[in-house]
Image: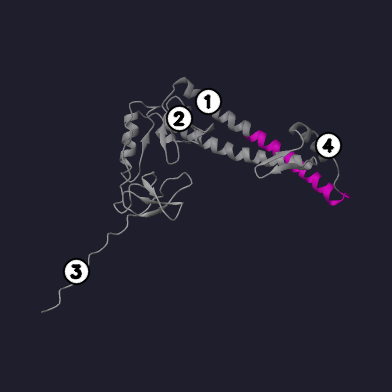
Amino acid sequence: MLTNLATATPRDIDTQLMALAMQELGQQRRLSLATEEIHRGAGDRQSGYGRRRDWGMTHEDALARAQVAAEKDPAGTVYPESARIESARRGLQRLQDTQVALKALEAEAAPLHAEYRKRPWTRYWNVAGGHVHSDDQCQTLHHRGRRTPLGWMPELSGLSMAEVIAHFEAMGSGRAVVLCTVCMPDAPTELFAKPSDPEVCSSGGTSHYSRHPKFPRHGVCRTCDATVSLTSTGVLRKHMRPEPARMVIVPAPEA
């Protein structure tokens, strides 16, 4: 816990907030388990398939019924009823413990958020395999109506764009880093690129090919003439350049 927020660095504050957020995520998972046990304790069932499964009762109705079930004595009851009673008791206790833990985390994070509002600083987020953003509400962070998952980078909090560039450059040239030019209009489009493999064809991931005459899901690369399978989006898969044919020189017969 930071003792003096007024002198704490943005990186220290955001690192602490990140740690609290991870603890909150764990408690939210416990809350989901508590909700499931409460519904089962209430005698509720789910309908649907896969991830689209819904409970028949509202949370309020299930909570009320679980509270009634928890007051019963499981001794002498048959198995299905005793199991519901135990599930209701576990769910209610876990719900209470989780709510207490979440309130404690919220109280611990409150002064950290207040310090940020008092003296706002730069923050950065990254997309896995994509750009680094300085705005978590960037207009580019949506694809087909769905929000793009972000990873917070508290180690960069408070840094200017020039300092962020220096940070990534110090990491070495083995990692490609691209700053979002929508969030940061003055940012370079690419700090450094991954070293290219001369044996890998540059047409991978493109439509630079001709249809294969015999295999409909394959194409003939126009760069290296290799026969390559296509992805579900109709582009060439990443592929190696074929080895050049070796010319064999046959010596002339002796006269």
Observer-side mark, 1 or 3, equals 3
Which quadrant is home to the C terminus?
A: bottom left
How many numbered marks appear? Answer: 4
Q: Which residue is mark 4?
A: 68
In screen coordinates, is 124 left or right of 64?
A: left
Observer-side mark, 2 or 3, equals 3
Observer-side mark, 4 or 2, equals 2
Could you tell me residue 13's position as x and y percent? 46, 31
Q: Which residue is mark 1?
A: 111
**Is 129 or 100 nearer to us in this picture?**
129
Marks 4/3: CA–CA distance? 92 Å
Identify the mark nearer the N-term, 2 or 3: 2
Marks 2/1: CA–CA distance? 31 Å
Kindly identify the amino acid type of the residue bearing the numbered disc 2.
Answer: Thr
Observer-side mark, 1 or 4, equals 4
Q: Which residues are magenta?
A: 75-101
Kindly identify the amino acid type of the residue bearing the numbered disc 4.
Answer: Val
Q: Secondary structure at mark 3?
A: loop
Could you tell me residue 53's position as x and y percent? 69, 41
- Pointer 2 with pointer 1, Cβ within 8 A: no
Q: Which residue is mark 3?
A: 249
Could you tell me residue 214's position as x and y percent? 43, 56
Kindly identify the amino acid type of the residue bearing the numbered disc 1.
Answer: Pro
Residue positioned most to the left = 255
Disc 3 residue crowd, few under 14, some 14–19, many 20+, Cα 10 Å: few
Disc 4 residue crowd, few under 14, some 14–19, many 20+, Cα 10 Å: some
Query: Could you say which disc has been placed on residue 140 in the image?
Result: 2
Instruction: Say if the magenta span includes residue 38.
Output: no
Relative vertical location of residue 202 with respect to residue 130 in this rendering, above or below? below
Kindly identify the amino acid type of the residue bearing the numbered disc 3.
Answer: Ile
Could you tell me residue 115's position as x and y percent? 48, 24
Identify the mark nearer the N-term, 1 or 4: 4
